[in-house]
Amino acid sequence: MNIEEKIQLIEEGTLEVIDKEELKEVLKKDHPIAYTGYEPSGKIHLGHAVTVQKLKTLQKLGFKIKILLADYHAFLNGKGSVEEIAETAEYNKKCFQALGLDETTEYVYGSSFQLDSDYTDKVYQLATMTTLKRARRSMDQVSRADDNPKVASVIYPIMQTVDMAALEVDIALGGMEQRKIQMLARENLEKIGENVPVCIHTPLLHGLDGDAKMSSSKGNYIAVDDSVEEISKKINKSYCPQGEIEDNPMIEIAETFVYPNQDTLLIKRPEKFGGDIELTHDELIKEFSEGNLHPMDLKNGIKDFLIEFFAPVRKYMEEN
């Protein structure tokens, strides 16, 4: 596979790659490193699985994958005690393994290196060159909306920038909510003599309730280890407006998980409602947008797919 073909694979299902010319140089390396960081703060759900799919693609292309289990970041973000976060991190790690990342994947706890003197020195250096205004712009959405945010919210993006240096990454992967922090890293890492990673951003999934973001804290998610009953219940209750394609979580799940993994979606229906049908992506969009496919039929197709798709995860979690 040549470099252009590799780039095409990497770009599939992403919103942007910053930047493509730099990516070409990274792909010439013998052992490039790609990373993403996850706060151990709850269930691993479809939103996380979006980036895991891309990590698996990078792994197949020869990248060393590092997953940061960002326990100190979770603590700074008020996600629990150190002990609670450590327990969640172990569960998260097991979920990532269950999702099919291979045994070469390296799982790194933030607390294993974020107290090192070299790390703290770089945090202090960046703190002297990052304005409050710029740091605030890089905060998570909740902190930006807070009239009285904690100092921890400002330290967070600076630490995340130094994480990329400490882990020696060539590619930083994250959802679009990570973009502001990753741009901060691209602006400042070179100033302290560190490698500037290529940044890849994947789409955010809407919550099952139609909210702008799927989130474990909002309860509007499908966890990768949900039971068959839980998946069925959540999908049946989900937001799926008749004929609407944009911001429809069922359409997003189809586009993000169904069609990258198979050519058609099987929708089972009683004969009196037309019988079973198998739809390609284009057929699904056409039939649903024109009102020929009932929302409950679409939900049933998505439900059946997810139950089968995550069966190996449920099995792994039960056995380990």
Image (cartoon, rainbow, N blue to C red):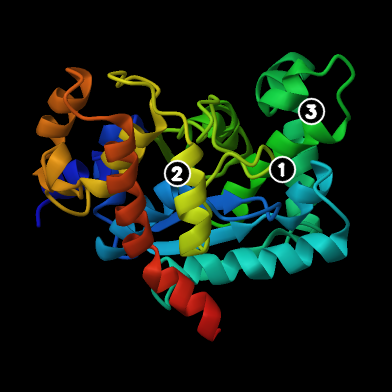
Q: Alpha-carbon distance for marks 1 and 3? A: 13 Å
Q: Nearer the viewer, residue 261 or 287?
A: 287
Please tell me whether mark 2 sits on a helix, a strand or a loop: helix
Q: Earlier in the sequence, mark 1 or mark 3?
A: 3
Where does residue 227 sit, x and y in percent of width and height?
Answer: 51, 64
Q: Alpha-carbon distance for marks 1 and 2? A: 37 Å
Q: Nearer the viewer, residue 84 or 312?
A: 312
* Residue under the image location 80 percent in, 39 percent down: 124
Q: Nearer the viewer, residue 137 or 166?
A: 137
* Residue under the image location 52 percent in, 70 percent down: 106
- Specify the amino acid type for callout 2: Ile
Residue 76 in view (yes/no): yes
**Residue 235 bears which disc, if any?**
2
Considering the image in quadrants, where does the C terminus appear?
bottom right
Where does residue 25 sit, x and y in percent of width and height?
Answer: 27, 45
Q: To which quarter of the image does residue 304 belong?
A: bottom left
* Residue under the image location 53 percent in, 76 percent down: 317
**Of circles 1 and 2, which is in front?**
2
Q: Nearer the viewer, residue 29 or 258?
A: 258
Residue 13 in view (yes/no): no
- The mark total stands at 3
Instruction: In the displayed orientation, state which residue is furthest to the bottom.
Output: 319
Q: Give the residue at mark 3.
A: 128
**Residue 159 bears which disc, if any?**
1
196 left or right of 116? left
Please tell me whether mark 1 sits on a helix, a strand or a loop: helix
